[in-house]
Image (spheres, grey):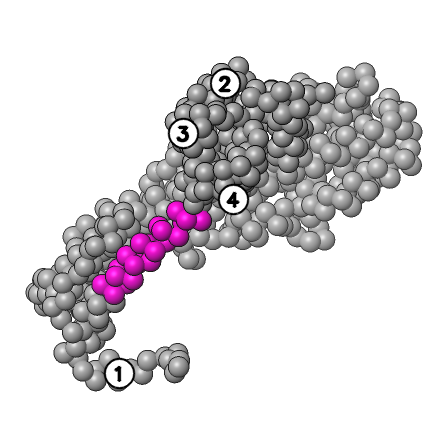
Amino acid sequence: MKRVTAIPWHYLFRNPSKSIGTRLFLIVVAGMAALVLLLGFSSYHVSKSVLKENMLNSVYRTILLMNEKLDIKFRSYEESSAQLALAVSESGKDSFDSNNPAYFSIQTKDWLERSLYTYKELSGAALYNLKGKYVGGVGLGFWEHENDDVSGETWFRQVVETSGKAVWLNTVDIDGSSGEPVLSLSRLVMDRTAFKPMAVEFIRIETESARDALLQPFAGSLGKTYIVNPAGTVMLSSEEGMIGKPFPAPIQPSVFESMQGKYFMTDSQGEEQLVVYARSAVTGWTVFGVIPVSGLTGKSRVIFWLMLWMAIAALLLSLGVGYYIVQKYIVPLIGLRNLMKEGERGDLSVRMQITTEDEIGQLGQSFNHMMEQLAKLAEENTGLSRLSRTDALTKLYNKLSFQEQLDRVIEERRKSYFPIHLAVIDIDNFKQVNDTYGHPIGDLILERVAKTLQSVADPDDFVARYGGEEFAVIFTRKSMQSVCEILERIRVAVAGLNHEELGGLSVTISAGVQSYSESRGKEQLFADSDACLYVAKRTGKNKVVKEKYG
C-alpha cells in the first residue's frame, strides 16, 4: 500500500470542481481575511476609551499577579526567618546570655551560619536581647555592632509587641559589594520550653531574585514598577536609581487605605499616566505600576486608515462566501453529524442521501457502508453474546456469567456496602434419575427445576446453572432470613412438581447458603456454601442449611 505523507500544493487545483479541499481553502482564506478586516474596522470605532479600558484591566491584572508573586517571595523570607529563629531556640537558651553580650557561644554562631548557608537569600542575622542590646551575629559585618542599642527604634518596639510575628523594616540599604538592595525584617525568638521570648532576631535579605524576576518592566519598555513603603519611599524598583527615593508620581490619599486600585494622573510633562497599585498582605508595602496611556492608544488611527478601503470589499465578499459555504458544505455536514448521533444512540438503520461526487459525497458513501457493516456486526454479536452467557439447556446464566456477576457485585460492595449471600443448590439423587430413566428424562427434570428457580426467586436475584445438576444463586441487598425464606419456597416448589415420566415420584433439592465478608473472599465463600450443601446432603437431603456447618 502506498503511504502518502504530504500532498503537493498543485494537487489542490487538479480538479477544483470536485475538490472540497480547494474550495474550503479559498473559502477559509477569504472568510478569515474578511473577518480580520471587519474586526479591525470596528475596533477603531470603539475608540481610545475602549483601548484605554482594556489596557487598564490588563495592567491591573499584571500588577495584582506581580503582588501575589511578591507576597509568595516575602512569605518565603518570613518562613526562612522563622526557621532561623527556631534553630536559635533549639540551640538552647544556655548557648547565649541575652543579658551579657560578651557571651555568645560558638554553638549559636554555628547555628546561625548553617542557617544562612541553607537559606541563601538571607545575607546576615543578628540577635538582640529583650532590652535592645546587641548579643551577636553573622554576615554583613554584624560582629562590628557590639555597642548597638536598638531599644529606641520603632521596629524594635513593634517586634516586642507582636508576640512573634515578623516585622518588616521600612528602610532599604544597598549592599556595598553587590550593589543590590537589602531589605530587613525582625521577629522574636521564643523559648519553646518556657513559651516566652528569649531574644529579638534581626535578618537582612538580598533581593536580587525578587527584583530580577518580579519587577521587570511590563507593557514592553513603557511601564515601570515600584514597591513603596507607607512613607512613600521606594523600596524596590525596575527603574534604575530610584531605590530609597520618594515615589515619582503623586500618591492619592486613598491608596494606603485600600488593598488595590487604579487611577489616572498627569505627570510634570503633561502626559497622562495610568497608575495601578496593590498592597502586600505580608509587608504592608504597595506595588505600583505606572504606564503612559498614549503609548498604547496612539496607534488606533493607523488601524482605521489601514482597514477603511478594504472593509467594504471584504464585507461584500464575506457575505457571498458565507452564504455559499453554509448552503454547499455546512448543511450536508450538519446532516451527516445528526445521522452519526442517531447511530450513536443505537439506530443503525440511518443512511445519508448522496447528491455529489466530491469528498462530502465520498464521506457519505463511507458512512453508509460503515452503518451497514455495523448493523450486521451488531446482529451477529447479539446472538453470540446470548449464547456465550447462557446455558443452552436451561436458558439460565452459565458458570462464566456467574463468575463475572459475583466479581461485579463484590466490587460494587467495596464502593458502597450491602450484604451478599451465595446459595449452592443440588438436585437430590439425580444420578439415579439418569441411570433409571435415561438422560433425556434427566434433561427434562433439569429444565423444570431451572424454571422453578427462576420463577420463585426475586427479579434481582442472579440464578445460574453452575454445572451438571448444580445451581448457584447470588442474593444481594437481602438479609440472611429473607434469603432462607426464598430458598425454602424454592425447595417446597420443586418438591411439589409433578413428573409423570417418573411414575409420580417427586424430585427434591438440597441447598447451602453462606454470607460474603472481606475476610472470607470469593473462593472461600463458594467453598463454605458448598460445605453447607454437603451438610444438607449428609443429614437427610431436601433441606436448606445456612452458615458454615461445623
In this rendering, would 314 be left or right of 142?
Answer: left
Which residue does the numbered mark 1 point to in the structure image? 11
Q: Is residue 229 above or below residue 210?
A: above
User: What amino acid does circle 4 point to?
Assistant: Leu
Local crowd size for mark 4, using a 10 Å CA cut-off: few (<14), some (14–19), many (≥20): some
**Vertical arrangement, residue 77 with respect to residue 23, above or below:** above
280 vs 83, left or right, is left
Dot 3 amino acid type: Glu
User: Left of 51 or right of it: where is 281?
Assistant: right
Residues rendered magenta in the picture: 368-388
Q: Main secondary structure of the magenta part?
A: helix
Residue nearest the viewer, comparing 196 with 385: 385
User: Which tag is nearer the camera, tag 4 or tag 2?
Assistant: 2
Identify the residue at image location x=66%, y=52%.
179
Determine crowd level at label 3: few under 14, some 14-19, many 20+ residues with C-alpha closer than 10 A.
few
Q: Nearer the viewer, mark 2 or mark 1?
A: 2
Say which residue label 2 marks.
488
In the rendered image, residue 429, in percent from the top left (x then y), is placed at 57, 30
Q: Which residue is mark 4?
A: 400
- Label 4 or label 3, whichever lies nearer to me, is 3
